[in-house]
Amino acid sequence: MFLATVYKYLFKRDKSFTVMLQATAHLSGLPPVVAVCGSTGTGKSKLAVDLARIFSGEVINSDAIQLYEGLSIATNKVTEEEAAGITHHLLGTFSAQWAAFGDVHKYKAACLPLVDKIRTNIGRIPILVGGTHYYLEAILWSDFLAAYTSSNEEGESRNILLPSEMSDCYTLLQKLNPQIASQLHPNNERKVRKALREALLSSSKQPSTSMGDDLKFGYPRNRSYHPRYPDDTLILWVDCDLAVLDARLDSRVDNMVRTGLIHELDLFLKNYFTEREFSKSNQTRSDQLNRLFTETCSVNDPSGRRGILQTIGFKEFADYLSLPPGSAERESQEGQQMLTAAIEKVKVATRQYARRQIKWITNRFLRRPEFGCIPVYRLDVTESMKSTTGLSSDTWDINILAPACRLIFDHLVDSGALAQLVIGNPARLNTLLDLCPPSARPRPCDFLPMRDDSAQIGAGSSVDCLFSCTVCGNRLFFRRADFEEHMRSRSHQKRISKLRRRQLLNSIKC
């Protein structure tokens, strides 16, 4: 009776709603899974919280760094005020030491039961939000990483003995899986060894379905084709003009420093070193930091210093953090120069990270066959970000929140899930739906054509493949842009000139 009263009030101006409700009342559809993606700093968390307040949803974090406790400023976790009382799952849940065991498989094991519980048991909308887009893909598609080592095989793969020399590892990987080998640089020790272990395990257990086999139906293997929640998933892509986003990211870094980023990093490292075995040695603070960051990058790191130690800010501030907190060295001219340089490095790293996030969305979610796809809806936050006081509420409602609400509401009606859902803020939803009528409903993004091998080598391509310069001793380049820059370099041109002179001399001798 309560729901009927709410619906009558909420949609009193839409006489057709009663007919729609009667037509779908017999269905028992579950609430959809909503995924909010986009580059850092675009307002993903704000959109997730706003939607959760309106539709009585719950938020699940899908940012790999925000899984860990601590470093709230450095990782840009939502504050208690920003969360607005909305339940957030997997946010600051694990200790930094858990990073030794954390990966996408462990995330799936923790996240999937939450999604099912929220949808099935509680009857609410789970809203996945975060910038680690391969975590999102692992949840939304059931076959993501299916060709790679599963979590059950992880221990077994670690027991596989590999050649000690990197060149031998890469040569063996080329024989077992040339497709994967062609995408990895021979000197990328961690990825080459990981891929080789997986190739050896796959070839020993499933020789007829190794990673190099073609997917049936003629589609390439390096995409996901089996949505975990078919016809029940919405991907909302919060996007922004890069120039506007860069300015916002720079401003955000400055604000992080003003609100205590340095103190937070100092405190975290102090607690971290206290728990490590080498804190009892006679190493200086600088030595400890150098060792910490060296082992973070090591494939043989016994402590698995991954996870939160990959936060943007640690390596960039390494030189400054090596100076004792509160010391005169930090306040000296040299110390302040270190601080200024570190802040600029963080800004550059953040802007680069934002571009990698956009690249994942376009290359994984959009550059794919339509078979097995999930619709992606782009919401442009550029106008809202132009406000000098933060995200403009008026343009936010019109350009972002209202279209998102329209998409979710229409899906609830079409699936029959609306009859079972308790709307958190009916009046607010009514206002937003008026701002975005059905005729203004966003259209899903077009899917981009897959590029074949010949297209990948074309001009302007930036796909991941190896380029070799035979003139310069078979020097390898992972990106085409780097290869082209090398071809224009002075050292390359000098080597070509030297080879031409040598050939000319040889021809004269003949």
Image: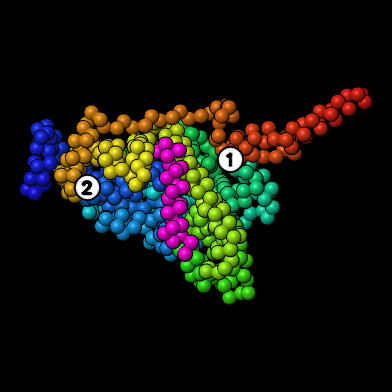
Q: What residue do we see at 32% from left, 48% from top?
A: 46
Percent across and percent down for residue 299 are 59, 56
Percent across and percent down for residue 38 are 40, 42
Pick whichever of labels 1 and 2 is earlier in the sequence.
Answer: 2
Task: Please name the residue that numbered disc 1 is placed on.
Answer: 183
* Residue 166 can be seen, yes or no: yes
Task: Please name the residue that numbered disc 2 is placed on.
Answer: 54
Q: How is the image coloured?
A: rainbow
Q: What residue do we see at 56% from left, 29% from top?
A: 460
Label 2: element kind: helix
Hey, what amino acid is under mark 2?
Ile
**Is residue 259 placed above or below 6 in the rendered structure?**
below
Q: Quadrant of the C terminus?
A: top right
In front of the other: 204 or 399: 399
Q: State yes or no: residue 238 in magenta.
A: yes
**Is residue 403 placed above or below 270 in the rendered structure?**
above
Hey, what amino acid is under mark 1?
Gln
* Residue 64 can be seen, yes or no: no
Q: What residue do we see at 38% from left, 60% from top?
A: 92
Q: Which residues are magenta?
A: 237-263
Q: State yes or no: residue 433 in magenta.
A: no
Q: Answer yes or no: do the residues labelled 1 and 2 have beta carbons within 8 Å?
A: no
Task: State the residue lying farthest toward the right.
Answer: 509
**Is residue 126 placed above or below 306 in the rendered structure?**
above
